[in-house]
Image: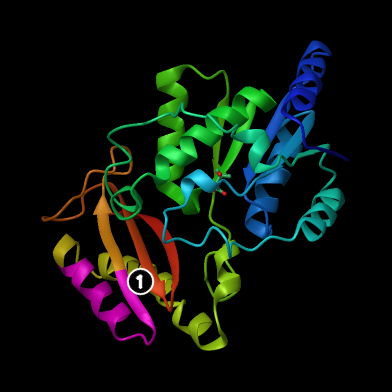
Amino acid sequence: MKVITSIEEMQTISKSIKRDGKTIGFVPTMGYLHEGHLSLVRASKKDCDITVVSIFVNPIQFGPKEDLSKYPRDFERDKNMLEKEGVDYIFYPKVQEMYHSDFSSTIIVEGVTKNLCGASRPGHFRGVTTVVGKLFNIVMPDKAYFGEKDFQQLVTIKKMVRDLNFPVEIVGMPIVREDDGLAMSSRNSYLSEEERKSALCLYKSILLAKDMIKSGIKDVKLIIKGIEELVNNTPNTRIDYIKICDPETLEYIEEGDIDGKKLLALAVFVGSTRLIDNVILEG
Ligand code: PAF
């Protein structure tokens, strides 16, 4: 496994892999890897000849009051994990390599970024699409893998790729959960023991919504009210949003019964850590 820090070198390597007629699978990450990331790596290894993982904590997708400086980082640990998985290249650029001092171009995907995390974190998706667009131009992957935990991110990147004709196939992979149901996230490392218990309210919300539907309660307002009660009765929590929406447009469904496949998405602060989770509900 080779660690590449220069954009030029990564592009040269990618071009030569392609010249040899081999396919590149790409897993973009911000590091501090967990089983969720490794599931993406394994899918890439299965589908493609060469697997590239990027590790880059992208400053432009963090808001001014967000956790950029304290975002967990441990390159040696990540490197060992990726070596064991048989990854071929880690792309590990410095911030100055990715954003030169007069950097001023961005990618904006409208529509699907308006609601959910887009509403709570202004500018976040512009940062994500800009860095992912850059990474696609640097790594030149045939396939790129993203987790469904960041459902809105996945929808946004698929839209960007379609709208701007990036020659890459986007593969979404299921959420990987801890044994008790908590969705894996690098941010779980911020949680104290007490908060870790409270964090389970996100998964319990998903189970509650599924149970309600199973018992014939499909009314959107009733389901959201049930989840609000559950989260509000959990210590250390503050609701950012609980929404049911169309899984493609991410437009909110504010009333009526759940009919067909709909996305339940929630973001909850547990202490000062903001956690997200989602599920497709079928009415
Ligand atoms: O999902 C993430 O870890 C990041 O948003 C991504 C896709 C690596 C872009 O920085």
Task: Report the residue at 27% width, 35% height from top.
Answer: 111
Task: Report the residue at 48% width, 54% height from top.
Answer: 149
The residue carrying mark 1 has its beta carbon less than 8 Å from ligand 1 = no
Asked if residue 244 is positioned above or below residue 227 in the image, the reply reads above
Q: Main secondary structure of the magenta part?
A: helix
Residue assigned mark 1 = 205
Tell me where residue 179 appears, x and y as whole percent. Answer: 60, 73
Quarter of the image where one finds residue 274: bottom left
- Of residues 93 and 265, the one nearer the viewer is 93
Asked if residue 73 is positioned above or below residue 132 in the image, the reply reads below
Quarter of the image where one finds residue 53: top right
- Of residues 123 and 136, the one nearer the viewer is 123
Q: Residue furthest left?
A: 256
Q: From the image, which quarter does the N terminus lie in?
A: top right
Tell me where residue 240 appears, x and y as whole percent. Answer: 30, 66
116 relative to 29 in the view: left or right: left
Q: Residues within 10 Å of mark 1 (few under 14, many from 20)?
A: many
Q: Could you tell me if residue 18 is visible in this image?
A: yes
Q: Could you tell me if residue 141 is visible in this image?
A: no
Assess whether residue 260 is covered by the magenta stretch: no
Task: Report the residue at 76% width, 35% height from top.
Answer: 51
Q: Residue furthest front?
A: 101
Q: From the image, which quarter does the C terminus lie in?
A: bottom left
- Look at the image and give the residue range highlighted in magenta: 222-239
